[in-house]
Amino acid sequence: MSCRRVFAPLLGLALVLATVPAAAQSRARTLGLAPGVFTPGPHNAITDVAGVRVGHATITLGDSIRTGVTAIVPHGGDLYRDRVPAALHVGNGFGKLLGVTQLRELGELETPVLLTCTLCIWQVGDALAQYMLAKPENDNVRSINPVVGETNDGQLNATRARPGLAAAVGRALAAADTGAVAEGSVGAGHGTVMFGWKGGIGTSSRVLPASLGGHTIGVLVQGNYGGVLQMAGVPVGQLLGRYAFQRDVQPAGAGRSPFEAPAPGDVGAERGDGSCMIVIATDAPLLSRNLERLAARAVMGLARTGSSASNGSGDYVIAFSTSRRVRRAPEAALNTNDEVGNDAMSALFQAVTEATEEALYNALLTATPVASRAGRVLPLPIDSVRVLLEARGIRPAR
C-alpha cells in the first residue's frame, strides 16, 4: 500500500486545524502516549528512584545566549566515598563526554552527572570539580573525575561565548531535589531542538511488579536530535511536513502538509543531526557489566521516536545503580556484592526501553518556544498531534 493512501485520511483531518487554538504544552500521557506495559512511578520521573535528585540552571543572556546546566545527583550522601556503580553505552560517538575513560575503567561514579552545551563541558567540568573539592570531607582528595555530557545547542545559542557557566553549575546543584522534575526548555534543554521543533529535558520512570523484583528505573533525557518523528508508530513528522531529508525525497513541486508549517525564521529539521544524552537511574542492584547492557537498551527507546543516530548525532547513555548492596568505598580491598542475575534482566530491559521512549516524548511535548538572534524554534503543535493520534485510536486513559 502506498504512503499516499495511508496518509490521505489523516491529512484530511488537518483541514479543521486552522480554527483550533494551540494547546498548552503537556506531558505524553495527556495525549494517550503511554509506551509499554509497565507502570510509571508516582512522579513518572527519574526521581522515582529513591534518593535521586535533579536540578536545573537556565541561562538567558541578551539576544544570543540560550543554554544551561542540568544536574543529576545519584544520592544525598558522600558521592566520592559512597560511589555508585555506573556504565556507558555509546550509540554514536559524535560528541564530547567528560570523564568517560575513568567511568569505563572503574565502572563507577564519584560525582553527580551534569548535562550542558557542547563547548561548555570543560568549564562545567572544572566547576563540578571545584564543587566537589570544596566539600570539607574532601580536604585531602587529589583526584576528581567529573562526568559531564553535552548536546550542541548552537542553532539557538551563541555556543562560542560560554558565559556564566560556573555560577550555573552551583545553581543547578543547589536546586537539585527529589519529586517532580521540570521538563522542556529548561537547564541543559534551554537551547535544544528535536526534529525541527523545540526540544529539551524529559523524564519518565517504570516500576516493575513484585514478581519481577519490584525495582524502579528512571530515565532523564537531553533531547537535541532529528530524524523522522514517530509517536506510538504514527509517522507524525511526515504528516506534519517536517522531517530529515525532506528536501531530498519530496517530489519537485510537491506541496506541504496542510498541518501547521514552520513560521519564517524557524529552524528546520534538515538532515537529522544533533545529539541525545540519556541518563538512567535504578535501585536494582546492578554492577557495571549489566548496567552497560541496560544502557544499550535505551537506544531502542530512542529509535522508536524516529532517530536513526545520524552521522552528526552524538548519542550517549549513562546508567547507574543507587542500591546500597552494590555501592563502593574507594579504599575497600574487597567488594562483595549481590547483583541481579542475567536471566532477571529482561524485565529491566523492557522497562528502560519504555521509559526512554516516553521521556523523549515528554521532552518534545513540554518544550516551549525559544527565540534568539539566530531565529526562533516553536514547539511541536499539540493539537495537530492529538488529531493524528486520535485517528489511530490513541487517547488518554479514562
Image (cartoon, rainbow, N blue to C red):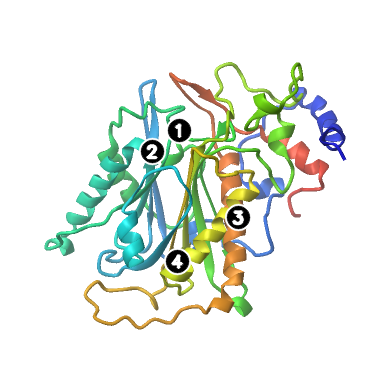
| Helix, strand or loop at mark 4 | loop
Q: Position of residue 375 (x, y in %)?
A: 49, 20
Residues under numbered marks 2 and 3 in contact, where contact means CB atoms less than 8 Å apart:
no
Circle number at residue 300: 3
Answer few, some or many: residues within 10 Å of disc 4's Cα (few below 14, many 20 plus, some between 14 and 19): some
Quarter holding the N terminus is: top right
Q: Earlier in the sequence, mark 2 or mark 1?
A: 2
Q: Earlier in the sequence, mark 2 or mark 4?
A: 4
Q: Nearer the viewer, mark 4 or mark 3?
A: 3
Residue topped by disc 4 = 50
Quarter holding the C terminus is: bottom right
**Alpha carbon separation for disc pair 2 and 3:** 24 Å
Q: Earlier in the sequence, mark 4 or mark 3?
A: 4
Q: Earlier in the sequence, mark 2 or mark 3?
A: 2
Q: Nearer the viewer, mark 1 or mark 3?
A: 3
Q: Earlier in the sequence, mark 4 or mark 1?
A: 4
Which quarter of the picture shows residue 325?
bottom left
Answer few, some or many: residues within 10 Å of disc 1's Cα (few below 14, many 20 plus, some between 14 and 19): many
Specify the farthest residue to the left: 140
Residue topped by disc 2 = 117
| Helix, strand or loop at mark 2 | strand
Q: Is residue 240 above or below residue 74?
A: above
Residues under numbered marks 1 and 3 in contact, where contact means CB atoms less than 8 Å apart:
no
Residue 145 visible in this rendered orientation of the protein: yes
**Alpha carbon separation for disc pair 4 and 1:** 29 Å
Residue 213 visible in this rendered orientation of the protein: no
Residue topped by disc 1 = 191
